Amino acid sequence: MNHPLLIAVLILAPLIGFLINGLRYQKNSANLSGILATSAAVLSFFVSVILVSEIFSLPQESRKIVVQFFEWIHVDSFRVNFGFLLDPLNSIMILIITGVGSLIHLFSIGYMSHDHGAAKYFAYLNLFLFNMLILVLADNLLVMFVGWEGVGLCSYLLIGFWFKDSQKAAAGMKAFVTNRVGDAAFLLGIFILFLTFGTVQFSDLVAMAPSVAEVSWWGPITLGTLFLFVGATGKSAQIPLYVWLPDAMAGPTPVSALIHAATMVTAGVYMIIRLNPLFLAAPNTMAVIAVIGVLTAVVAACIGLLQNDIKKILAYSTVSQLGYMFLACGVGAFGAALFHLMTHAFFKALMFLGSGSVIHAMHEEQDVRKMGGLKKYLPITHATFFIGWLAIIGMPPFAGFFSKDEILGMSFQSPYGNAAFWALGVFGAILTAFYMTRLMALTFWGKARFSDKLHPHESPWTMTLPLCVLAFLSAVGGWIGIPHVIGELLPGHPENFLEKFLEHSILPILDLPKAMPTMEYLLMGTSVLLAALSAYFAYTMYLLKPEWPKKLADKFRPLHELVSNKFYVDEIYESSLIQPLIQLSKNIWLYVDVNLIDKTTYVVSDLTKGCGGFVRILQNGNAQTYATYISIGIVLILSILLMR
Amino acid sequence: MLLSSVVFFPALCALLLSLWPVQKLLKSFALFLSLIEFGISLFILSQFDVSTASLQMVEKYPWIERFGINYFLGIDGLSIWLVMLTTFLMPIVILGSWNSIEKKWKGFLACLFVLQTAMIGTFLAIDAIFFYFFWELSLVPMYFIIGIWGGQRRIYATVKFFIYTMLGSVLMLVAMIYMMFLTEQAFGTMSASLLDFYRLNIPFVGGQFFSLQTLLFFAFSLAFAIKVPMFPFHTWLPDAHVEAPTPGSVILAGVMLKMGTYGFLRWVIPLFPEATEYWAWLFIFVAVLGIVYGALVAMVQTDIKKLVAYSSVSHMGYVILGLFSMNSFGFTGGLYQMLNHGVSTGALFLLVGMIYERTHSREISKYGGLANVLPFYSIGFFIVTLSSIAVPLTNGFVGEFLILLGSYASNPVFTYVAVLGVVLGAVYMLWMFKRVFFGPESVLIKEHPLHDLSVREYFVLVPLVVLIFWMGVFPKQFLGFSKTSIDHLVAHRSDYILMVQGQEGKQP
């Protein structure tokens, strides 16, 4: 097979889709643009499948396809090609991106059918796929950065898609700027790694990663990886840069599913997994990643408890789940991070699309308090959402169970982990079960709380088909990573397929203690049981005893206020960062530019004018005055001569 | 003859145009002439030998023999793209000003062409006095362009512009003459040739301001720093831009500012290597300050044109940062950023001019919802914005990345501050973009009958947009021309000597 051609088709198909839809963007036939864009995505998906099967057919050690297109920048020792590489690690990524991406494109045809800007929407969506594929296929940091900024740009365009609404446009800008903070750090990371290793090529960086860990905080590897991680906190919405993601829900819902749940926001996790030997060489960075990850997981889940906008609940849930992935990276369980990335892509895309279906049916209503009882009207949406719910709260044998369990288990067992990480992780899982059950109860179950005039109806097949496929994946997607302790109990002893597949891409954790089955069962059982209890509690609270939430809120008023206002993080940023910066800028402009520099030059020019003015008085063109000067001069000269 | 024709053909055009008998076809004729000039420069590009760092296509004739002053033109990898930038922007500027200039077309075009001669001459002159002649000549037509065709406060702005730049140049002239005397001491005959200047060994005492090399260094630097403009000499720029007519702004930002940075690259850095090395921290400090300062002040501007003007201060800060990092990344990035800034800021001023022609307002607060009314104009503006904030695959990224890399290699601490510019750049551009193009349609927009880009405007914008992506995706094609010269500069910075092609063996 011609690999360069296949990779080119894979990447360029969405770009061509973008160009076609972009050029005819004023046409508002949603169907045609949608079919065009979807075909581009599906074409990419097929090519991905071909490429991944090629990868499979190669012997295990040499599963790698490298393609170099042309030299991009070459200055002195800095040399970067437009080069791409495919190995088991990003095989999974491209399947998720093009596969889930195609489904979301299909879903969008139905969702955007009434929108006048459909062609533009599909153009952006294709452009996003193009950039995302560059990001994951890049064989060096700089080309990855191309995709990295590119997806941010598409995210900006799609969040602000309905830009007539100033608030939505502002949300787009917030996303871009917050991401830019991360991107600037990413650039610094590239500089440090390049100046340390003399290359930005992944294969070289990974090969050169020292086997001895760097202990110092100021060592180049620690500093470089830390900066890259700051880049990741921007793109993947972690503390302290997560604030853009909830606002990003201003965009059309399928965008939230594709960009802000399944693909773009996982870019940071992917980047860390890609460079895992380098991160392993910097234990301090690993510790920071784990701590930030687990904190984000818990804090975002807390905020999710009291949100009322269905998409915002899902957004905070995404932030929280991304936190788990970073926790996994931080404790060295890169395989588990990728596993959770994948299962999360399935169930979160499913739930976002499901919420899109709900919003579509409710005529743009997003407040869960005004829903209820939708199970009756939206049977397919409900059934699929139900599976997603089971998956995210980690009920066996659904996808989320296996991946989350692996993360929690590793955060306990790994030499980088500890009991506190595990406990916080389980606490996060309890919160997750609570807010997701609350979402289910308020949206689908119980009595309808919307007006009688509204007649919600199930969505067309273009929207329900993707839901069904994703529901299927959310149900069985976890089976490719069945842990050994469970595999041994099952007939035929299925092995952990994913672990084996990634064997050569991911460094194993050194001195990982041998797993004890009883211990694993205990950990697993505890988290599942607690999550189930929490879900039951939420079910009771929101369905059987609807007066409880209010009572509880009254009882813990300050805490309730704090959490439902999202810990006032946005307000703190606004008042401590943004406003002072604007004020400072106004002041320096007024005082430095206008008053100091210009005034100084005025003084200087006045001085010059003054001197000139004085000299001017002397030359008034009056012959008598001149005669006076001459006589004064003669007298002076004569007196000097006479004095000698 | 090639270089002489590219320098003096525009002057001839100016003469031709002022003698042109009819008003009709005047603009078309001017456009035609500027395209011929662009053709000449393309021919030079095709003849350019990328394998040598020596001066090429040299033309040298005695001018004032007593003082060793020559008519001396030469081109190399440092100047070739700046010449191309100038000739490329000229037809675009003429086309862009088609409707915005309302009176005295003949005089306007004559000024523009004389200005072109002056700018190209500055980039190609290798003789100090000849260089100075072009350097000062460039002020005159710009003085008139702002003063006659400018806005409300044009007289104030143009006088400020003239005095600021003039002030710096005077010291430079003194330094040049002093260096001519130094050549007489060193070589026996007086010479104003830059090549002879390079061979001088000017004594340098570190830590002492009143030592010869340091004084000469600062005399030159002041002239160039004002032109760039570097903080705190930048305040003439916003005023000049706001009052200048669109074509004036485009040429001013697009090319004239580069005369300053080119001066650093051609004159200051190779001529005074020890002083440059010693004082680099000061320039890097001021450059970084300018990057952040320009961006912050740009953020709170209420006038779009002023915002773009302050963004120039920030972007030119990057160029200086690159040049004074003094490694190949920095030099290459700095040189590339000069071109990028010419393209993207030139395009921004043209775009601002286009909307000003339609609504006669530049107040950001009066706009809103433009994206809905003028979709193609908005797309163009957005692409140029991307270039300005250095998104990868646009030209801006390559330059900014190389500059920051070079700067990190030589000065990590300052780079940590400079990357703030990456964030702030996005803030002020996108905030402006949001207020002007997004949101509900404002009263101003509802009141004016707006039409989207005309055919002429497409011809203005498309070449710029194409160039933005071309330079972003295939920077090698551009940098290949400058590589040898930059490598030569990096390798021989402390003992820089430039030869004339074909005479490398001979002793001058």
Image: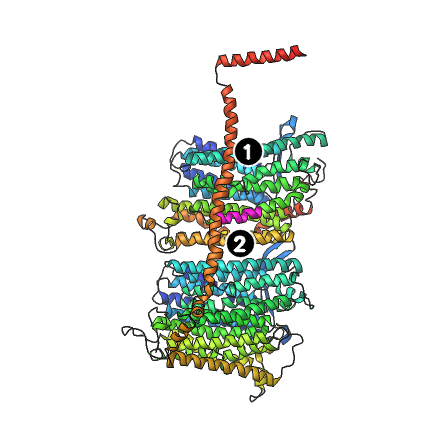
Task: Determine which quarter of the picture holds residue B3.
Answer: top right
Quadrant for residue B179, please give it.
Answer: top right
The amino acid at mark 1 is Leu
Location of residue A447 in the rendering, given as x and y in whole percent from the top left corner: 33, 79
Q: Identity of the amino acid at label 2?
A: Val
Quadrant occupied by the C terminus of chain A: top right
Indicate which disc, 2 or 1, sits on the residue closer to the N terminus: 1
- Which element carries disc 1, helix, strand or loop? helix
Q: Position of residue A211 (x, y in %)?
A: 69, 68
Q: Which residue is mark 2?
A: B422
As for residue B290 lying within the magenta part, the answer is yes
Q: The residue tagged with tag 2: helix, strand or loop?
A: helix
Q: Which chain's residue wears label 1?
A: B
Q: Please tell me how many numbered marks the rendered image carries.
A: 2
Q: Residue furthest front?
A: A555
Inspect this view and state whether residue B2 appears: no
Task: Identify the residue at the far bottom of this view.
Answer: A491
* Chosen colour scheme: rainbow
Pointer 2 local density, CA inside 10 Å: few below 14, some 14–19, many at least 20: many
- Residue B128, position in %: x, y? 61, 34
Q: Which residue is at a point 47% across and 67% down the rendered structure image? A: A260
- Specify the quadrant that holds the N terminus of chain A: bottom right
Residue A294 falls in which quadrant of the image? bottom right
Disc 1 marks which residue? Answer: B167
Magenta span of residues: B287-297
Q: CA distance from mark 2 to mark 1?
A: 33 Å
Q: Main secondary structure of the magenta part?
A: helix
Relative to A603, is A59 above or below?
Answer: below
Which one is nearer the viewer's eye here, B463 or B375?
B375
